[in-house]
Amino acid sequence: MSPTQLRNARKRKAAKAKKAKEKEQREREEIRRERGDKFPVKSLDLSKGEGSKKSKPSIDPSQAYISSPKTCPRVLSAASYFASKSLPYPVHVGPLTGWRTSSKLAVRLNHKGKLTIGLFEPSSHKITPASSSPAHHPSINAVVKILESTASKIGVTPYDESTNLGDLKFVFLNVDRKSGTVQLTLIVNLLPTSPLPSSLSSLTSTLPSLTPLISTIYVHYNLSTTKHDNNIFSFEPDTWSLLFGPPCGIEEELEDVKTPYQLKLYFPPTVFRQANVTAFQGIVGRIREVIGELGRKDLRVLELYGGVGTIGLNLLDYVSKLVSSDENPHNLTPFNTSLQNLPKNLRKKASYLQESAEGVVKSGNLSRNSFDLVVVDPPRKGCNPAVLQALCGRGEKDLKTLIYVSCGFDAFKRDAETLEGKGGWKLERGEGRVLFPGADAVETLAVFKR
């Protein structure tokens, strides 16, 4: 876009954000009026803090409601919505500290000109250190401290948005919950064909000798042509390079799900993994309970936005057929690896479509293959319009149950109204899981019946 178009786009984005914030504030006040003092919502006063009264210290938005996670606005809004449907909305909260086993952190110079690994302050790109975050698994904090110190000593150049210069842009850390080791990815400001600068080569060769916590090191090449490009990852295979350790440093077993078979899930850095696996396995376990109540072992299940099959592969004893799908091409290998480690009678039930949810429904897979149940776990923006249209179609006479896992409640509410209004679905039950304790967010598990 031209400079003028970019300015106009930024203005529109700012106006939209302001409108959304005002709407959220109105909803919060409405909920508070309805519930009185039963669920007080504390507001943040940024002018209070240590030092000068005029100073406005940075506040981590992810800790804003840590003293009472169930009172964040989106939890209250979700509970109010389900109450309007005469449905309960139980909310579950897991551990408040040490739960984050997956973290993307920026690498920038702080106000003193020192390389810092951390988070951006609210509404800015000013960096705040994150090496002592109470939300992080201890292994993440430990590796960040070592990485930050070593990169500074070696002379690694952090990224600068204003010039689009600098070598190291972000770091991505994943913790294997069983071993406590870290799968580390360095996101660099280079083309895949470019050799690593000597400072980055020295960093990657030195780190494994400094700590046994690092099991795997990847480099992901991300050369932005504009400072307005916010994409951190790319699906392109040639943008990923393994420098140390095994190709996949993360193996997960969701012990709390309690399948009658042993299932291992694999998460290289190229695929999506929940930041709070401990809490998310509660959702997977609840889905098994819901499906178990149907009293069948021959269900035909379609899983859209399936990732590596985190939900679907935990349902194989209830199905005669599982088709899982996702557009990320890197998901196929982890899915098949998990499948190959299962007994033959379970392996033959499952297959994978390397295709977007929109592509799956537009190609006729939903209408052509009579499914009894569909599981959707879309991104924060909700289901693709084509997916909603397909789910609202009346031709799938066998499709009786829809399980919707939502990480964006506003989008879920919009989709639910469409499903009930146009698709003949009825919202039967729901519950909330606070996967990011302290943040204004809630994960919703909902069950619709035709």
Image: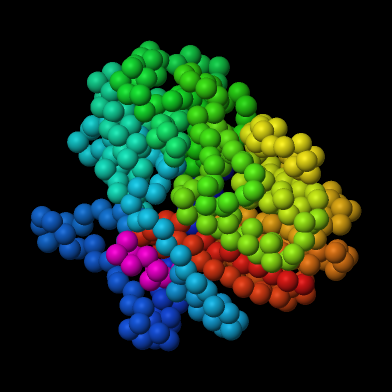
Q: Determine whether, in the image, residue 71 is placed left or right of residue 361.
A: left
Task: Assess whether residue 76 is covered by the magenta stretch.
Answer: no
Image position of 271 with respect to 199: above or below? below
Residue 389 seen from this side:
no
Residue at 26% x, 43% y: name it: 132
On the image, the x and y values in percent for residue 252 come to: 53, 39
Residue at 30% x, 20% y: name it: 210
Q: Quadrant of the N terminus?
A: top right
Residue 150 seen from this side:
yes
Q: Determine whether, in the image, residue 92 is placed left or right of residue 392.
A: left
On the image, the x and y values in percent for residue 122 come to: 34, 54
Task: Assess whether residue 69 is covered by the magenta stretch.
Answer: yes
Query: Toward the viewer: 222 or 437?
Result: 437
Query: Toward the viewer: 386 or 123?
Result: 386
Q: How many labels does the image show?
A: 0
On the image, the x and y values in percent for residue 260 come to: 64, 48
Image position of 435 with respect to 250: above or below? below
Image position of 436 with respect to 261: above or below? below
Q: Determine whether, in the image, residue 368 is placed left or right of residue 291.
A: right
- Quarter holding residue 168: top left
Q: Name, please, the residue furthest toward the front.
A: 260
Q: Name, please, the residue furthest toward the left.
A: 52
On the image, the x and y values in percent for residue 433 come to: 49, 62
Question: Magenta region: which residues?
Answer: 65-74
Residue at 51% x, 34% y: name it: 250
Query: Toward the viewer: 38 or 119?
Result: 38
Image position of 376 with respect to 231: above or below? below
- Quarter holding residue 389: bottom right
User: Please, which colouring scheme is shown?
Assistant: rainbow
Q: Quadrant of the C terminus?
A: bottom right
Residue at 66% x, 74% y: name it: 427
